[in-house]
Image: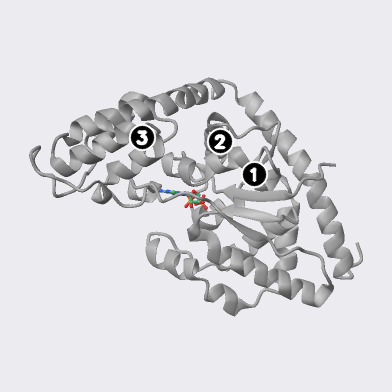
């Protein structure tokens, strides 16, 4: 058995992933898999919780998300990559943790309140949706994970996981370690309209998109509003294109020139975007092509998910053994 520390993280199969996912999570996963025993879940039950009224896309989206992961370098030889519902113990541990999770903790969860308000086209006043953080706690604890790599936006959920651990261990003994937060060292990537890049805002650049499509989007992306005309001076720090440069452009000299060019109006936004596009294409063109290649063979993808689930189940079964014993159940 792999003795390295275990790490778990997951994403919901709600559609194709974008550059924000890559910058804010996936590149970090690619590094972590060299150091830790990583479990990466495609959280279909979590997708079900918000999309239960129309589940028609979830199955295909499991493949889409897998392709995005593989294309950027998440490696099934190094990590277990699997679909949450294929490892039945996720459902079992969710039920076990539901016994001890106080309603108040869930009702107070900031993301719960926020989502109910934001997603008004969906009726999320369901039993399962309230329990979303309990399932998430279950996902993490099933692998008795040492740590969870998350973005800032998820740290409240992780705190709730730790509270659930303390309560569970308080009742039944030391079964679970309190997972640590491994905060992903990445700034938020802005989308085409300057807000956070997000599928729900329709402002994203997707990993699967070819370079012509990406350029057509980048070309019209908002810049510092002060630069209405070519001769207007701007401030890079107020420009979302600059933030994307910071991720893709590793050429310090060129960055300094562009910075100066923006401040003095020596360089126009279109030129700045063309430079950015060259760096985007250098990184993304091979990723996009690899993805297109991988997409040709679904059987290979299915195989990867089967292997991943097998590896995950070994740990999951051992954990559930501990849970049932600690809870003094006849099993
Ligand atoms: P979920 O898959 O649970 O719906 P999200 O799609 O919101 O979650 O994001 C998955 C991960 O990608 C999170 O860790 C989040 O912080 C990160 N992420 C998403 N959008 C961005 C962005 N625009 N910039 C940086 N990181 C992002």
- Classify mark 2: residues with Cα within 10 Å, few (<14), some (14-19) or many (20+): many
* Residue at 51% across, 43% down: 56
* Residue at 60% across, 68% down: 159
* Residue at 68% across, 31% down: 304
- Please identify the quadrant where the C terminus is shown: bottom right
Q: Tell me how far mark 2 sits from mark 1, CA to CA.
A: 10 Å
Q: Name the residue nearer the viewer: 268 or 329.
A: 268
According to the picture, the residue beneath numbered tag 1 turns out to be 40
According to the picture, the residue beneath numbered tag 2 turns out to be 69
- Asked whether, in this view, residue 158 is left or right of residue 269, the answer is right
Q: Tell me how far mark 3 sits from mark 2, CA to CA.
A: 29 Å
Q: Of the numbered discs in the image, which one, if any, rests on residue 252?
A: 3
Residue 116: x and y, percent?
Answer: 43, 67
Q: Is residue 316 above or below residue 29?
A: below
- Classify mark 3: residues with Cα within 10 Å, few (<14), some (14-19) or many (20+): few
- Asked whether, in this view, residue 70 is left or right of residue 78, the answer is left
Answer with mark 1 or mark 3, whichever residue precedes in sequence: 1
């Amino acid at each position: 058995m792999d003795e390295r520390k275990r790490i778990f993280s997951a994403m919901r199969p709600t559609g194709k992933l974008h550059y924000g996912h890559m910058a804010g999570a996936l590149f970090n996963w690619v590094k972590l898999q060299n150091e830790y025993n990583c479990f990466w879940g495609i959280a279909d039950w979590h997708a079900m919780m918000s999309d239960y009224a129309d589940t028609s896309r979830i199955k295909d989206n499991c493949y889409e998300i897998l392709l995005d992961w593989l294309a950027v370098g998440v490696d099934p030889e190094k990590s277990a990559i699997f679909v949450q519902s294929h490892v039945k113990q996720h459902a079992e541990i969710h039920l076990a943790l539901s016994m001890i999770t106080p309603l108040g903790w869930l009702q107070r969860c900031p993301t719960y309140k926020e989502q109910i308000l934001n997603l008004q086209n969906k009726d999320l006043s369901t039993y399962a949706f309230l329990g979303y953080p309990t399932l998430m706690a279950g996902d993490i604890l099933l692998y008795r994970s040492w740590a969870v790599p998350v973005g800032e936006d998820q740290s409240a959920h992780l705190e709730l996981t730790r509270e659930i651990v303390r309560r569970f261990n308080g009742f039944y003994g030391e079964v679970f370690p309190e997972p640590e937060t491994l905060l992903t060292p990445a700034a938020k990537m802005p989308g085409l309209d300057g807000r956070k890049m997000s599928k729900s805002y329709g402002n994203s650049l997707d990993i699967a998109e070819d370079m012509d499509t990406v350029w057509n989007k980048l070309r019209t992306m908002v810049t510092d509003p002060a630069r209405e005309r070519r001769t207007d001076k701007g401030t890079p720090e107020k420009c979302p294109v600059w933030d994307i440069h910071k991720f893709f452009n590793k050429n310090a000299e060129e960055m300094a020139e562009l910075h100066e060019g923006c401040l003095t109006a020596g360089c126009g936004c279109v030129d700045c975007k063309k430079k950015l596009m060259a760096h985007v294409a250098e990184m993304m063109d091979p990723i996009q092509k690899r993805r297109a290649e991988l997409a040709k063979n679904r059987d290979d993808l299915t195989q990867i998910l089967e292997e991943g689930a097998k590896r995950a189940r070994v740990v999951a079964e051992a954990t559930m053994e501990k849970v049932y014993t600690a809870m003094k159940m006849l099993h």
